[in-house]
Amino acid sequence: MRSPGPPVVSVFPHDRAAARALAQRVAAALADNPRLVLGLPTGRTPVRFYHDLAALAEHGHADFSQATTFNLDEFLGLAADHAGSYRSFMDAHLFSRVRIAKERINFLNGAAPDPVAECRRYEAAIAGAGGIDIQILGLGANGHIGFNEPAPELQPRTHRVVLTPETRRANAALFAGDPSAVPAEALSMGMATILQARSIVLLATGRSKAHCIAGALRGPITPQLPASFLQLHHDADLILDAAAASQLTH
C-alpha cells in the first residue's frame, strides 16, 4: 500500500497503449498474488483492455485459475444468458478466453425476484472473499462510475438505480442500437463499496471524457460527479490516453 495522496495519473499517446498498460498491470498483479480479487467494469472503453488481458492469458502471461472477480453492475430484469446482459458481455470479452472457474466469477443477478435481497447478497459475497484487491473502473461521459449516476446524494452500498437517458443511449449497442430497449434500471455497487477496494485503477479514453477527468481531479468532491470521490482513496490511479487527459494542466 502506498502513502495517501492524490490519484496518480499516467497518460499514454492513444487508447491502445493505455489498454495495454492496464492489461500488463493486472497480469503482474496476478503473478504477485494468484488469489487476487478483481473488481471489473463493462462498457466500450474496457473492451480493448479485456482483449489485451485475454491475449496475455492465452500466451501464459496471466493466470486467472485462482483469481476471483466481481463485476460492478448489471441491468435489472435481465437474466445472465440474455444477449444484452453485462454477464454475456463479460463472457464474450474475457471469461471465455481465460482459465477461470465459474464459481470464482461473481455477478449481480439482474433477474433476482428480490433486488434488495440480491444487493445484500452481493455485499456479503464481497466481504466473504476478503474484499476487492484491485477495482478497475470505467468512466461515463457524465462522470458516473459503475451505475452511480450524478445525483444530489449517492448510495453507499450495492443498490437499485434508475438509469439516465444518457446512460441508456450509451448502452444501446448491446440492444441493437435501440436506447428504448435498454432496461430503465440496474443494480450497481455503491460508492462506499467501490472505495473500500484496496487499490483502484480508472481507465478513461477519448475526448468526450476529458471534462469529467479534469473535474474529478481538480474540482470539488461532489455527488454530481461521482468520479470525484476517487480523491478520497489512498491508492487510486488513472490511466488515460492523450485525448482524455487533454483538459488537464501539468
Image (tube, rainbow, N blue to C red):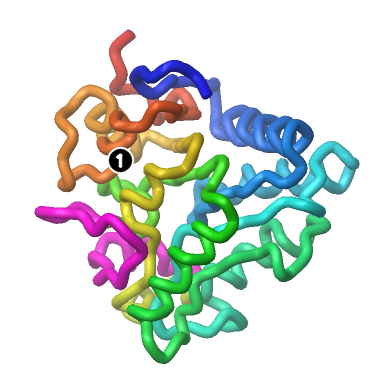
Q: The C terminus lies in which quarter of the figure?
A: top left
> Between residues 93 and 111, which one lies in front from this camera angle?
111
In-front residue for pair 192/163: 192
Q: Residue furthest bottom?
A: 113
Question: Residue 235 placed where, x, y %?
Answer: 45, 27
Instruction: Give the percent coordinates (x, y) of residue 32.
Output: 74, 31
Q: Dot 1: what SS? A: helix
Residue 155 in the magenta stretch? The answer is: yes
Q: Tell me the residue that label 1 is attached to.
A: 227
Residue kind at label 1, given as amino acid type: Ala
Q: Residue at x 56, y 42 (%)?
A: 133
Can residue 43 be spotted in the picture? yes
Vertical placement of residue 35 versus 183, above or below: above
Question: Farthest top residue?
Answer: 250
Which residue is painted at 46% across and 79% down in the image?
110
The magenta span reads 149-174
76 shown above or below 222: below
Residue positioned most to the left: 152
Whether residue 227 is situated above or below residue 162 in the rendered picture: above
| In front of the other: 250 or 119 | 119
Q: Is residue 8 above or below residue 23?
A: above
Packing grade of label 1 (10 A; few <14, some 14-19, many >=20) is many
How many circles with numbers are drawn on the protein? 1
Residue 228, percent across and down? 26, 36
User: Residue, x 59% and y 56% (percent of image)?
Assistant: 129
Question: Based on the displayed image, in which of its 4 quarters is residue 188 positioned?
Answer: bottom left
Q: Quadrant of residue 13?
A: top right
Q: Is residue 179 left or right of residue 107?
A: left
Q: Does the rendering let one see residue 176?
A: no
Question: Splitting the image into 4 quarters, where does residue 151 fall?
Answer: bottom left
Q: Nearer the viewer, residue 222 or 180?
A: 222
- Answer with left or right where residue 52 lies relative to residue 200: right
